[in-house]
């Protein structure tokens, strides 16, 4: 008679034997079921995508694992499909590999798998293959997840930073810094009132709206690690131009500003997990903002600045008081393990 499964991860769950089989079938297959995954083959058999592909990979080590507005399960799905979406691809399939620490509660692993399933359904993708490994107690931190994603490339994907020109408009799809503020507050024991929530969500609908409106972004990115400032600094460096943004136009929630003020963090460097940054030709600025505001997740879209000839730094912030502040990529990450 097979014993009842334990309530925590055992080293045997990574053995490839009976415990592994039960873990895969009871925790993952029951939640992420689809024909490709259910076959439990060494490789998923996928339909012909009928066109060029985009391929991405990512890893997730967020701490804490669960936070207001999401968890590592939803984060790993949204993070991967969003990388595909801003690269100009329609997300199709994901893989997911789990590094589990001995002793991790199986109830938490089920919760993560449920979250992944819900996020995948919302994004219109399937997790078609995966793997699990177990490390000894004290040699991990609960669970790490590594993903890969495949998407079908659009006919006109964003050409990238080197196509940016002076006069182009800088647009964000909504309030910035929500995810970073949530993680920071959770680590510091702040936000007892629960006003902060991660913005984690798929952004493919935002990108679809731009293309449907006839907007063709020169540059498109999701501002995860390093936030808006890092995205624009990297683009400015590659283009040898400066993104001049205005503080009075940049949407940041009051709750996020409060956390930043208390802890001495700049919201422009805080991560988002459900926003896009688009640089578009000047004549498409109005269409882009209207298109984003017309779909869920884009209601707070705003044109926040303009690309100008290179100045002192790749990003120049015009402050509320008319001064200027230079931004560049950070020498070190002020908030590690954000995703």
Image (spheres, grey):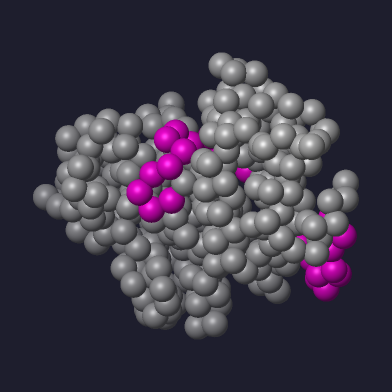
Nearer to me, 242 or 152: 152
The quarter holding residue 23 reads: top right
Q: Is residue 48 above or below residue 233?
A: below
Q: Residue at x 52, y 48 (%)?
A: 111
Location of residue 93 in the rendering, given as x and y in whole percent from the top left corner: 72, 60
Q: Is residue 290 above or below residue 338?
A: below
Left or right placement of residue 264 versus residue 50 in this view: left
Location of residue 318 in the rendering, given as x and y in whole percent from the top left corner: 23, 51
Q: Residue at x 40, y 68 (%)?
A: 297
Nearer to me, 286 or 312: 286
Q: Residue furthest left?
A: 321
In which quadrant of the rendered image does the N terminus lie? top right
Q: Residue at x 80, y 64 (%)?
A: 35
Nearer to me, 74 or 161: 74
Residue 212 is one of the magenta-drawn residues: no
Magenta residues, start to end: 44-70
Q: Residue furthest bottom?
A: 213
Let me know if residue 232 appears in the view: no
The quarter holding residue 102 reads: top right
Left or right placement of residue 203 versus residue 310 in this view: right
């Amino acid at each position: 008679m097979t014993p009842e499964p334990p309530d925590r991860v055992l080293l045997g769950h990574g053995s490839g034997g009976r415990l592994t089989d039960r873990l895969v079938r009871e925790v993952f297959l029951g939640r992420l079921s689809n024909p490709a995954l259910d076959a439990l083959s060494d490789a998923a058999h996928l339909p012909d995508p009928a066109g060029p592909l985009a391929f991405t990979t990512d890893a997730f080590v967020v701490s804490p694992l669960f936070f207001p507005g999401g968890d590592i399960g939803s984060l790993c799905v949204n993070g991967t499909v969003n990388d595909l979406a801003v690269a100009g691809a329609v997300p199709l399939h994901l893989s997911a590999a789990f590094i589990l620490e001995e002793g991790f509660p199986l109830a938490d692993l089920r919760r993560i798998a449920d979250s992944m399933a819900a996020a995948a359904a919302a994004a219109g993708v399937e997790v078609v293959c995966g793997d699990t490994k177990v490390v000894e107690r004290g040699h991990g931190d609960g669970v790490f997840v590594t993903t890969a994603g495949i998407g079908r490339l659009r006919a006109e994907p964003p050409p990238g930073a080197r196509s940016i020109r002076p006069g182009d408009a800088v647009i964000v799809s909504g309030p910035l810094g929500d995810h970073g503020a949530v993680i920071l507050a959770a680590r510091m024991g702040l936000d007892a009132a629960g006003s902060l929530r991660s913005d984690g969500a798929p952004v493919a609908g935002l990108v679809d709206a731009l293309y449907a409106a006839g907007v063709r972004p020169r540059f498109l990115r999701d501002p995860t690690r390093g936030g808006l400032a890092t995205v624009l600094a990297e683009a400015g460096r590659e283009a040898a131009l400066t993104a001049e943004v205005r503080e009075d136009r940049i949407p940041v929630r009051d709750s996020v500003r409060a956390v930043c003020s208390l802890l001495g963090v700049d919201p422009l460097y805080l991560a988002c997990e459900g926003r896009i940054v688009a640089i578009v030709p000047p004549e498409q600025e109005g269409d882009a903002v209207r298109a984003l505001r017309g779909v869920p997740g884009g209601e707070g879209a705003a044109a926040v600045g303009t690309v100008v000839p290179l100045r002192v730094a790749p990003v120049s912030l015009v402050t509320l008081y008319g001064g200027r502040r230079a931004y560049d990529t950070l020498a070190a990450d002020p908030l590690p393990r954000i995703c």
